[in-house]
Image (cartoon, helix red, strand yellow):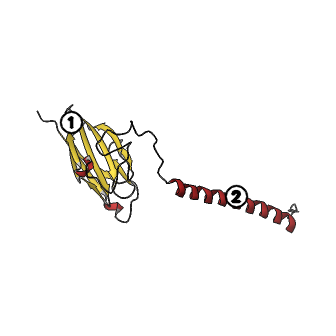
Amino acid sequence: MAPRIQRLDHHTMEKYENIWFGIAVVMSVLLAVAVFASFLSGTIPRIEDEGGGGHHLEGVKNGRINSRNFAGTPFATPGLVDNKDGTYSAFVVARAFAFDPPVLKVPAGKPVTFYLTSADVLHGYYVEKTNVNATVVPGQVASFTTTFRSPGPLNIVCDEYCGVGHHNMLNKIIVEAPQP
């Protein structure tokens, strides 16, 4: 004969239900307080040091930029810039289902520093066949430096869902052979 299973009586079940209900109420109150506090303080963390750090780009202060107005910044005319020291800077703006510039030509074997920002929502910047993968946040500037060794085309995709046209958000880097 199978062993008999002891059932909990109504009062014991009610006690456990009240304990779990109390835990749920406490968690809900904590969540509500956290949401309310984030609205009061703002959702972007403040950077107290206004003097240094961050990117040394015109119009960019402590890695922050006005995503509604790129005038006066290098992002007003995105593309590749040949620096005096032999390096290159690439300025890329991600916006509603497109990268600007749509095609970026860079030289092989030269360091290129990418500066990325978004004009609207969160985007991703993934360069296929490389280890380049950056998250592009509106109002912030992401940067990285890389050297493309071999010439040829490289596809870029947005790897953060950004809306209904996300699947069309493609770009291309053309790595050109060094000129003799």
Q: Quadrant of the N terminus?
A: bottom right
User: Please, which residue is most extreme toward the bottom here?
Assistant: 10
| Rendered position, 41 above or below 55 | below
Q: Is residue 160 visible?
A: yes
User: Please, which residue is most extreme toward the top here?
Assistant: 85
Residue that appears at 57% across and 55% down:
37
Classify residue 36 by image quadrant. bottom right
Q: Residues within 10 Å of mark 1 (few under 14, many from 20)?
A: few
Residue that appears at 37% across and 66% down:
164
Q: Is residue 45 left or right of residue 107?
A: right
User: Where residue 16 sits in the image (x, y, percent)?
Assistant: 80, 61
Residue closest to the eye, 90 or 84: 84
Residue closest to the eye, 68 or 171: 68
The kind of secondary structure element at disc 2 is helix
| Rendered position, 95 above or below 149 | below
Q: Which residue is the site of mark 2? A: 26
Residue type, numbered disc 2: Val
Disc 2 to disc 1, C-alpha distance: 57 Å
Q: Please give the label number shown on residue 83.
A: 1
The kind of secondary structure element at disc 1 is loop
User: Please, which residue is most extreme toward the left here?
Assistant: 180
